[in-house]
Amino acid sequence: MGSLDSPRERENGNGGCRSPGDPKVGEGGMIVVESEAMKKRRASMLPLEVGTRVMCRWRDSKYHPVKVIERRKMPSSGPNDYEYYVHYTEFNRRLDEWVKLEQLDLDSVETVVDEKVEDKVTSLKMTRHQKRKIDETHVEGHEELDAASLREHEEFTKVKNIATIELGRYEIETWYFSPFPPEYNDCVKLYFCEFCLNFMKRKEQLQRHMRKCDLKHPPGDEIYRCGTLSMFEVDGKKNKVYGQNLCYLAKLFLDHKTLYYDVDLFLFYVLCECDDRGCHMVGYFSKEKHSEESYNLACILTLPPYQRKGYGKFLIAFSYELSKKEGKVGTPERPLSDLGLLSYRGYWTRVLLDILKKHKANISIKELSDMTAIKAEDILATLQSLELIQYRKGQHVICADPKVLDRHLKAAGRGGLEVDVSKLIWTPYKEQG
Ligand code: ACO
Ligand code: ZN
């Protein structure tokens, strides 16, 4: 599977890209003299309106379609010197960025979109989930927001606020907006203590903090240790500030997820790589203490320097091991992000194929669900996408020819990190007092 972040791999060559070439060299190598009219036309477009669709040169040196999301004046500059915050319409929002005018191909400007009309349409298209997400990010209650507040929220979160963070030995570029408290509005970089996750505006503040901070691992109980990997369970009620800091940090990499200020209701499972300097956070998942929708995971994150090494699937596997200990089936909270879906699909596929192979497919969806703690709907969807389901006499039946199974197993490859259940020391959450 190609990288979701690389249009070159995703688009299979140059699909969707266009290279305008040198505007002064015409077809057959003829030198084209730019007419006054063309120059005038370009100048009349500037500065570009928010909503404009145009081609933009990306880091692969190719041109991709973008939509202008925001513009800002460059300091000490002429009347038309703006930078533009653009969204590459073919790619995920995490690639949105500020670009200079030189990167835009003005000859490709399509239309000037009436933002007001467009916003109205998109807000009407919002699903219940999206609305809920926004409710919870914005206000404490769960009331539905009207279209105007929804638009205000979109407006507020459309441009990334923090560009980079320092965490432990890594400097990490962020992906999305995160609603840090207003006093951080003027920061483009934040410095995190990698242990207590407090964040600061300046490096010196962090250095001072590190001399005083006595944490060397997440607060809470170590519930799993295997080699250098440890998992800590942090109760949001007992460690409120840590829980909130973790949410602020995580939101920088999660787009369609809620930021819960009410961390009391959650447990955080923080995965660390440990050495003699301490336990360094690799990723985490959060879990509601009580979920009416049988969610066994609310948010999951692998920090970018640790991604694509199997930690995501380890965290997913861990969430299902907890569900097994609770004697419940579980499912991740929706919506899933692109990378979230990919990781879950990969996990479900491997787990289910392994069992089908052992049982020669002679097993029901209910039995699979009991064995794996994966919710029946997720099992059905996975097996349907693998074309291993037939609908007979009003029932879904698993039909897996051994050859087909082998082919799928081969395509799925091997999973990486396994959860060693014998090393998990944990009892399900019980309200105290
Ligand atoms: N491009 C293409 N494939 C990718 C990419 C990528 N950038 N990143 C991961 N994958 C694939 C891997 O190849 C692997 O595929 P496989 O199952 O075929 O082997 C699968 O995704 C999982 O890879 P892992 O290494 O196990 O996962 P990782 O540690 O990278 O973490 C995660 C996955 C947690 C989704 C990570 O990408 C992340 O933190 N993303 C940002 C936050 C996010 O989107 N979280 C999910 C939101 S949904 C929810 O919270 C319920
Ligand atoms: Zn600290």
Image (cartoon, helix red, strand yellow):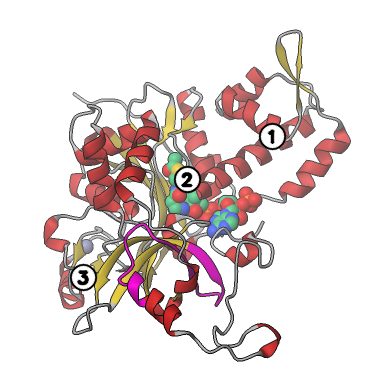
Q: Amino acid at mark 2?
A: Ser
Of 57 and 344, which appears nearest the observer? 57
**Do the residues under discs 1 and 3 have CB atoms within 8 angstroms?**
no
Q: Does the beta carbon of the residue at mark 2 sit less than 8 Å from ligand 1?
A: yes
Q: Which mark is residue 385?
A: 1
Q: Which mark is residue 337?
A: 2
Nearer to us of marks 1 and 3 is 1
The residues bearing labels 1 and 2 have C-alpha atoms spaced at a distance of: 18 Å
Of 148 and 381, which appears nearest the observer? 148
The percent coordinates of residue 117 (x first, y second) are 33, 43
Q: Which residues are magenta?
A: 43-65
In the picture shown, does residue 270 fall above or below 236?
Answer: below
Q: Residue at x 50, y 75 (%)?
A: 59
The percent coordinates of residue 377 (x first, y second) are 58, 24
Q: Amino acid at mark 3?
A: Met
- Kindly tell me whether residue 230 is visible in this rendering: no
In which quadrant is the N terminus drawn? bottom right
Q: Amino acid at mark 1?
A: Ser
Report the residue marked by disc 3: 210
Dot 2 lies on which element?
loop
Q: Does the beta carbon of the residue at mark 3 sit less than 8 Å from ligand 2?
A: yes
Q: Label 1: few (<14), some or many (≥20) within 10 Å?
A: few
Dot 3 lies on which element?
helix
